[in-house]
Image: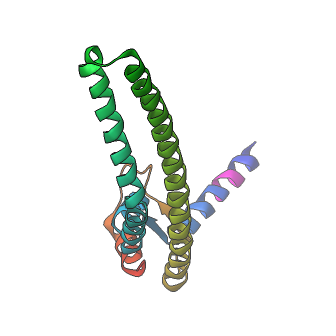
Amino acid sequence: MKRLLVLLTTFLFACNVYAAELKVGVINLDEVLQKSTLAMQLNAKISNDFKPRQDALNEAQKKLQDNIDQLTYTAYKLTPEERNTLQTNINTQRTDVEKMNLALQNDLQAAQRQGVQTLLTKLNSVVQKIAKDGQYDMITSSANMLYLNNSINLTPQVLDQLK
C-alpha cells in the first residue's frame, strides 16, 4: 500500500511539472464569428445574394395582405362569385408565399452553413499557424471558461490573421 501511495505521489508530481511547462492559448469563437473581417464579408455576401428574393417575398406578402384586407372590408359589397374568386386567389397566394418563404429559408440556411464551413476551414488553418509559430501545446475555446487571463487570449491574433 505504501508503494502505491509513493507511485501515485510521484505520478502526480510528474504531471504537475509537465503541466507547468504546458503552453496554452484560448480563443473566443463567438467574438471571432461576429467580428472577423471574413465573417462580415460572408454575411454581407449572403445578404446581397438573398436581398432580391427577400424583397420579392415581402412584396408577395404585402399583396396577400392587401387581398385579405379587401376581402375582410368589402366582402359585404361583393357578389358571391367575386367573393369566391377573391378567396381562391388568397388561398393560392398564401400557398405561393409559404412555398417562397420555405425555399428562401432553406437556401439561406444552406448558404449560411457553407459560409460557416468556409470560415471554420480558414479559422482552422489560422489557429494551426498560430500554434506552430507560437509553439503552443494546446489552443482551446473560451466557451465554458469562468476566468480567462488576457495573456493567453489569442482572439486578437486570430481576428488579425482572419482576413
Classify 127 as above or below 73: below
Q: Residue at x 42, y 30 (%)?
A: 90
Q: Quadrant of the N terminus?
A: top right
Please say whether residue 43 is one of the residues in the magenta stretch.
no
Q: Quadrant of the C terminus?
A: bottom left
Examine the residues drawn in magenta and state their main secondary structure: helix
Q: Position of residue 51 (x, y in %)?
A: 37, 60
Q: Quadrant of residue 153?
A: bottom left
Q: Position of residue 26 (x, y in %)?
A: 44, 65
Q: Is residue 89 left or right of residue 19?
A: left
Q: Residue at x 41, y 81 (%)?
A: 161
Q: How is the image coloured?
A: rainbow
Question: Range of the magenta residues?
Answer: 6-10
Q: Quadrant of residue 36?
A: bottom left
Q: Position of residue 72 (x, y in %)?
A: 28, 20
Q: Position of residue 85 (x, y in %)?
A: 43, 26
The residue at the far bottom in this view is: 133
Camera-side residue of 90 and 160 = 90
Q: Let me know if residue 22 appears in the view.
A: no
Q: Is residue 102 left or right of residue 67?
A: right
Q: Residue at x 54, y 49 (%)?
A: 106
Classify 153 as above or below 107: below
Camera-side residue of 71 and 49 = 71
Q: Residue at x 34, y 73 (%)?
A: 156
Q: How many numbered marks appear?
A: 0
Classify 132 as above or below 69: below
Classify 131 as above or below 107: below
Q: Let me know if residue 15 appears in the view.
A: yes
Q: Quadrant of residue 33?
A: bottom left
